[in-house]
Image (cartoon, grey):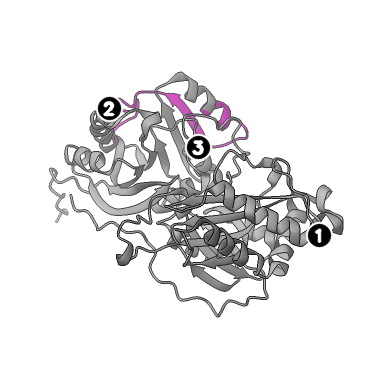
Amino acid sequence: MAASEASTATTALSPVRTLAPERPTYLLLVLRGLEFLVIEEIRAKLQVDYLEICSIDADDKLRHVDVMQGVAGVGRILLQTSSPVEEVRGLLGVQAALAFLAKSDNVISDDAKQGLDQLVKMTMEADWKPAMQLWAEHMRLIRPDRFKDTDATTSPSFRGSCVRDGRHAFKSVEVAAEIGGAVAEKFGWKVDLTQCDLEVVCLVFHTHMIVGLSLADTTKIQFRNRMANEDRSIMADSKYVSTLRPSTTYHMLRLAGYKKGDILLDSMCGVGTIPIWCAQVTENEIFALGGELDSLPVTKAGQNAQTKPRNVDIMQWDSTRLPLRNESVDKVIIDLPFGVRCGNARQHSKIYPKVFKELYRVMRPGSRAVLLTSLKKTFVHSLQAAPSFELTHTYEVNIGGLLSAIYILEKPAVPASTPAAKPQE
């Protein structure tokens, strides 16, 4: 069992051309650790004029700062493109899109007044014209009834918000309030904390800040969330203990390297996010199987799968005793249970080896499994007790502020215990 070194996949990216400050710029928030997949998608789908990964890298001078921990440590990409807004909104690997205003890597964190004044100054001294232009384009597309008139885009109701991680002398609500007050004073816009047209979002991560205007439909934002929720409209009911972001599902599907006709398995599917989104994204070129032990999520997953015709089948089963034939599955994608809401490490240390053993049985030789968990030690120890999977890649990622990892396992094309067949003479 050979394992590659863990990778955060944030290798230096040479910007395409140079950033034109007078042009609208997208700030794309993406899964930290898999920025390279988003870059590939952008280059494949859009006309790129400028492209830069600006996620926070580890600093030897600040060893106490774990850049893979914290919600504000989300991956960040700056993009300038001449492609229509519809195509940008069609990017599947993006968690949230904003119109970029400003960023800094030298936030004052030990003095509340100086720090707040600095954040307000950087936000208000930014050029708002291109950002507002980009925001208006998106609003006219997604909310045409509300924003068909010019007044609605030039005098919107708004709110300020802040997502913050690290030690600071100020609080998140203070950042939001100070920026909100400055915006209201400068533009004369009405503040509306629950039904706003526009949201000014400031991310503060230790000594780093970045701010932009949310391009999401604010009527659909769950304001209790620290980050904008993704569109889950293809799901009838996505409420459960925890549900994977559709963008993360898309990344895992790409890492699986699917091909037309593959049978894809998620043996611990919850409400069905992975099998349903994989069938949706591939336009039913694959057949997705999902299952869960408890009846409640199975019922919800079944309802979600039936919102439109899809090559998806949902069943109730025990993931350690699957009702599937040997070597019948081409790809496996699972968001393994982790976190306090999904049991504890001791329980998982007993379940993981049994799950791996069963996956090995049902997977075809040469097939691949893409597995996500934050329990890295439990995963590695469990894998050592499982059959001879080959661990080919490990990608460290930030899932909801938690350091996690996506593991890629492959079942050998010819099992180690079975000698290769000799060609007939």
Residue interval drawn in magenta: 301-327
Question: Which numbered circle lies on residue 154?
Answer: 1
* Distance between the alpha carbons at the discs numbered 3 and 1: 38 Å
The residue to which callout 2 is attached is: 347
Q: Main secondary structure of the magenta part?
A: loop
Report helix, strand or loop for mark 1. Answer: helix
Asked whether the viewer can see residue 379, the reply is yes
Q: Which residue is drawn at 19% across and 40% down?
A: 381
Q: In which quarter of the image is residue 64?
A: bottom left
Give the SS element for disc 3. helix
Tell me the CA gap for discs 2 and 1: 55 Å
- Residue 389 % position (x, y): 22, 45
Task: State left or right for residue 99 relative to residue 11.
Answer: right
Labels 3 and 2 touching (C-beta < 8 A) = no
| Residue 252 vs residue 67, the one in the foreground | 67
The vertical placement of 340 against 262, above or below, is above
Q: Sequence order check: which comes first, mark 3 or mark 2?
A: 3
Residue type beneath disc 1: Thr
> Which corner quadrant of the image does residue 149 belong to?
bottom right
Q: Which residue is located at x 33 percent, y 62 percent?
A: 62
> Which residue in the structure is indicated by mark 3?
273
> Mark 3 or mark 1: which is in front?
1
Q: Which percent across, then down, holds residue 415?
A: 18, 45
Residue at image x 40%, y 56%?
A: 33
